[in-house]
């Protein structure tokens, strides 16, 4: 499928609006989300059934040419097959007309993407952790979501209601007349809408194409080095020499007493049991909802804190320097894992990435093995070892005594001037986009090479055996170009 390209001067953004649906609308939202899950499960069964059939035929000694043909998992093929069978399939025949076609298209598109990710992961074309074979979504665990790309999708003139296909008009939790005014002015256009049940509340995320105004940051020539930590969330070293600290509010730690009490209540109720098919009691569901509210409040407070911090930094500085932290590896420390997860280092990096791009500023990412804490910010000498328990840096060469986090912040901000000669410095005006610069480490210090590519796994027969083709192996009316020669080991 051809990738959408916004017109010049415009950018694709998203607005997440909380909904206040009544009982009738809630039923329709649940129905559409359930239809998307049912379509996803149908697609998984539709594709994998042939895999098992071919495995059984191979065990009977049938030649390759006489085996059951592959079924394509591309979105056009899945749509065609689903539309041909939905009127006669007993799983859909009695109720498929109750929901919008976009609900079923959502499930089929998610299944197609899941098979694509699995295929690319098996062939080594996809970075990150290994992706397994798509599995069925369970009713109680599946996330309730549905995406609308066609039909009536609009924000009403009063700014307090939105209209979605087959769902109807839904009240917003807060008024947003500003969005309606921008749509009327022609500076914003709605592309799609996604409804989702998250943290006990329904949300509608509108993907829009909007005109980007030229916004100049407060200090385009200034730089800041950010050293993230647990005791202090962030130590900000300014290029003018000042150092400020952002406190770590530790929202999860503050809620631990309430969470323990709520968890004890839940454990004393009769909960669900998959082995015996036992259904949860009403008292268990009530206690579980209360416990979930505590978790939701913690997540909301954390999200609010991080957004305020990253937005302030992106609006003030022309250059921001951060470290490339191995957050997943740090989370394996059983003594610090909970506090590291509560600090959300990875989320800070993610928000800074797109917010600096939005404001036209520069984000410099220091190498993972750059010894920011071990290097003296005055003379540049590097210590061989500096345990985490040592909170004060003492230089053996020049005698500098400084807090280790402040010393790391000074070293990070020094990278901004060092990399300005190799890359253009952001002007602070939106539109002058400068991609994140990755800086290598110094010759000394904790510098080592890591394997960046996963060794290729040998293709074995596995549980189902044989090989699987690309998504276009079956018959389809496809509308996108894909690799038809990709042969992968199955499972």
Image: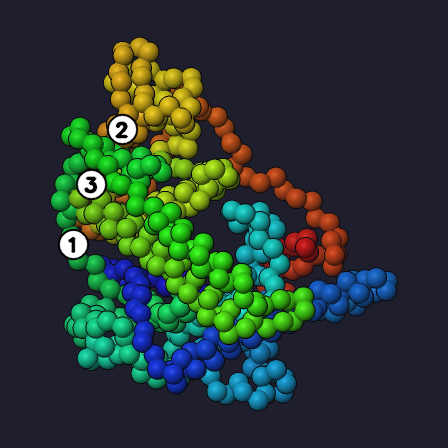
Q: CA distance from mark 3 to mark 1?
A: 14 Å
Q: Which residue is mark 1?
A: 214
The x, y position of residue 453, in whole percent, is: 54, 39
- Mark 3 to mark 2: distance in Å? 20 Å
**10 Å neighbourhood of mark 2: few (<14), some, or many (≥20)?**
many
Q: Quadrant of residue 229?
A: top left
Query: Which circle's residue, 2 or 1, is located before the other in the chain?
Result: 1
Report which residue position mark 2 lands on: 406
Q: Is the residue 213 above or below the residue 78 in the image?
A: above
Residue 29 in view (yes/no): yes
Front-most of residues 213 and 19: 19
Q: Which dot, 3 or 2, sits closer to the camera?
A: 2
Disc 1 on helix, strand or loop? loop
Left or right: residue 222 compared with residue 258: left
Dot 3: within a 10 Å radius of its alpha carbon, few (fewer than 14), some, or many (20 or more) residues? many
Residue found at x 45% / y 24%? 447
Q: Residue at x 57, y 68 (%)?
A: 270
Q: Kindly identify which residue carries mark 3.
A: 318
Q: Residue at x 31, y 80 (%)?
A: 170
Element marked by disc 2:
helix
| Residue 432 in view of the camera | no
* Foreground disc of the pair 2, 1: 2
Between 144 and 401, which is closer to the camera in this rendering?
A: 401
CB under 8 Å between discs 2 and 1: no
Q: Residue placed farthest to the right in the image?
A: 61
Please provide percent x and percent y for residue 333: 49, 37
The x, y position of residue 13, in whole percent, is 30, 61
Snapshot quadrant of residue 268: bottom right
């Amino acid at each position: 499928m051809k990738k959408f390209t916004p017109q010049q001067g415009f950018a694709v953004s998203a607005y997440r609006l909380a909904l206040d649906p009544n009982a009738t609308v809630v039923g329709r939202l649940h129905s559409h989300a359930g239809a998307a899950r049912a379509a996803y499960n149908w697609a998984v069964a539709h594709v994998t059934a042939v895999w098992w059939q071919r495995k059984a035929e191979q065990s009977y000694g049938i030649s390759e040419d006489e085996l059951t043909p592959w079924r394509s998992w591309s979105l056009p093929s899945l749509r065609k097959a689903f539309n041909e069978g939905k009127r006669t399939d007993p799983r859909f025949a009695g109720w498929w007309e109750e929901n919008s076609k976009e609900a079923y298209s959502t499930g089929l598109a998610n299944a197609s993407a899941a098979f694509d990710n699995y295929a690319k992961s098996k062939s080594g074309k996809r970075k990150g952790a290994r992706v397994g074979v798509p599995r069925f979504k369970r009713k109680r665990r599946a996330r309730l979501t549905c995406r609308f790309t066609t039909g009536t999708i609009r924000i009403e003139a009063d700014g307090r209601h939105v209209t979605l296909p087959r769902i109807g008009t839904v009240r917003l939790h807060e008024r947003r007349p500003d969005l309606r005014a921008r749509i009327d002015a022609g500076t914003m256009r709605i592309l799609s809408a996604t409804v989702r049940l998250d943290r006990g509340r329904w949300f509608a995320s509108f993907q829009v194409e909007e005109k980007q105004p030229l916004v100049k940051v407060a200090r385009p020539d200034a730089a800041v080095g950010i050293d993230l930590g647990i005791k202090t969330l962030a130590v900000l070293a300014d290029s003018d020499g000042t150092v400020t600290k952002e406190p770590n509010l530790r929202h999860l730690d503050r809620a631990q007493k309430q969470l323990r009490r709520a968890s004890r209540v839940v454990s004393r109720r009769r909960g669900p049991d998959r082995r015996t098919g036992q259904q949860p009691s009403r008292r268990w569901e009530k206690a579980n909802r209360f416990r979930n509210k505590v978790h939701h409040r913690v997540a909301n407070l954390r999200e609010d804190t991080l957004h305020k911090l990253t937005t302030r930094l992106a609006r003030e500085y022309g250059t921001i320097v951060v470290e490339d932290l191995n957050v997943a590896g740090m989370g394996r420390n059983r003594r610090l894992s909970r506090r590291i997860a509560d600090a959300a280092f990875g989320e800070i990096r993610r928000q800074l990435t797109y917010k600096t791009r939005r404001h036209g500023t520069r984000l410099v990412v220091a190498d993972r093995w750059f010894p920011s804490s071990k290097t003296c910010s005055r003379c540049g000498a590097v210590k061989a070892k500096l345990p985490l328990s040592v909170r004060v840096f003492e230089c053996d060469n020049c005698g500098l005594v400084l807090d280790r986090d402040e010393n790391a912040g000074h070293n990070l901000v020094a990278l901004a001037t060092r990399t300005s000669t190799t890359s253009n410095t952001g002007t602070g005006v939106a539109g002058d986009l400068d991609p994140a610069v990755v800086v290598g480490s110094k010759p000394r210090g904790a510098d080592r090479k890591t394997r960046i590519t996963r060794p290729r796994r040998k293709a074995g027969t596995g549980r189902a055996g044989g090989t699987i083709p690309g998504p276009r192996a079956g018959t389809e009316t496809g509308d996108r170009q894909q690799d038809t020669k990709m042969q992968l080991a199955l499972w």
